[in-house]
Image (cartoon, rainbow, N blue to C red):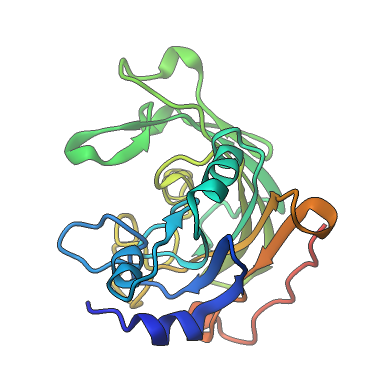
Amino acid sequence: MDIDWPELRARSLLFEDDAVLALNKPAGISVTGERHDIDIVAAAAAHGETLYPVHRIDKVTSGLILFARELSAHGPLTRQFNKQTADKAYLAIVDAGSPELPDTGTIDLPLGVGRKNRVRVAAPRETIRREGDRWSVAETDLLNTKNYPSTTEFTVLARHREHTVAALRPITGRRHQLRVHLAWIGHPILGDPLFDRSGTVPRAHLHSWRLGLAVDRLPGGRLELEAPPGDDFWSPLPGPPPSLPEPQ
């Protein structure tokens, strides 16, 4: 898909200064490096603008994506993701499932890579244990492959007959972490092409919502960003979207 960079930039702009650019990315557009696809970095470069992604969100995910406009700003920002000090929050509409999600919970399931380079929980599905509001696997049940500790916290914001709206906080930042964690505990993200086989909606209902980073040059030493979800994100719900909590 071709990208009209000037139009996308103007429509999606959340914040910019001399060092960074933040966009509210539509679902279905790649950030960078997708084979056989046009991405934001390449589209910007074609118009003479160099962007360095500070983090990544999947092509199917909408929402907040931050770029550095100069390399001197890139390193201090990306290190906060590597050290897991960046504050990240996502919104998701998931299958209500049975049993339903508790009001709050923690998914502590290490991830690995399986066949065809697909990310999966690094243990057999039947060994996943739920104890109250926490999902985990015993170390003795881990597959004999390389695995990466991965933790997601969530808070339920609204419940409907078929779907649940949740705020997600990835403590770690593994590839496909939120999508895999929710699917493997029985609550796949609506429209996820990897895990939702219903094929009834045109997009994955996962949205990069809020991001907080330390930036010494800014007043207060913080950069706090929020990307409001579009109507297409909320479209599966039978009524108006839920009230979203204020930043803490």
Relative height, residue 246 to residue 237 (above, below): above
Q: Is residue 236 visible?
A: no
Judged left or right of residue 76, residue 212 is right
Residue 21 sits in which quadrant? bottom right
What residue is drawn where x is 57% and y is 50%?
73
The quadrant of the rendering that contains the C terminus is bottom right
Q: Is residue 132 visible?
A: yes
In front: 50, or 92? 50
Where in the figure is residue 204, as x and y percent of width and height? 40, 68
Relative height, residue 147 to residue 1 (above, below): above
What residue is drawn where x is 43% and y is 51%?
179
Residue 6 sits in which quadrant? bottom left
Where in the figure is residue 30, as x and y percent of width and height? 33, 64
Relative height, residue 122 to residue 29 (above, below): above
Judged left or right of residue 187, residue 91 is right
Where in the figure is residue 115, as x and y percent of width and height? 19, 35
Residue 39 sits in which quadrant? bottom left
Judged left or right of residue 167, residue 11 is left
Where in the figure is residue 108, as x and y percent of width and height? 56, 33
What residue is drawn where x is 45% and y is 79%?
9
What residue is drawn where x is 45% and y is 60%?
189
The quadrant of the rendering that contains the N terminus is bottom left
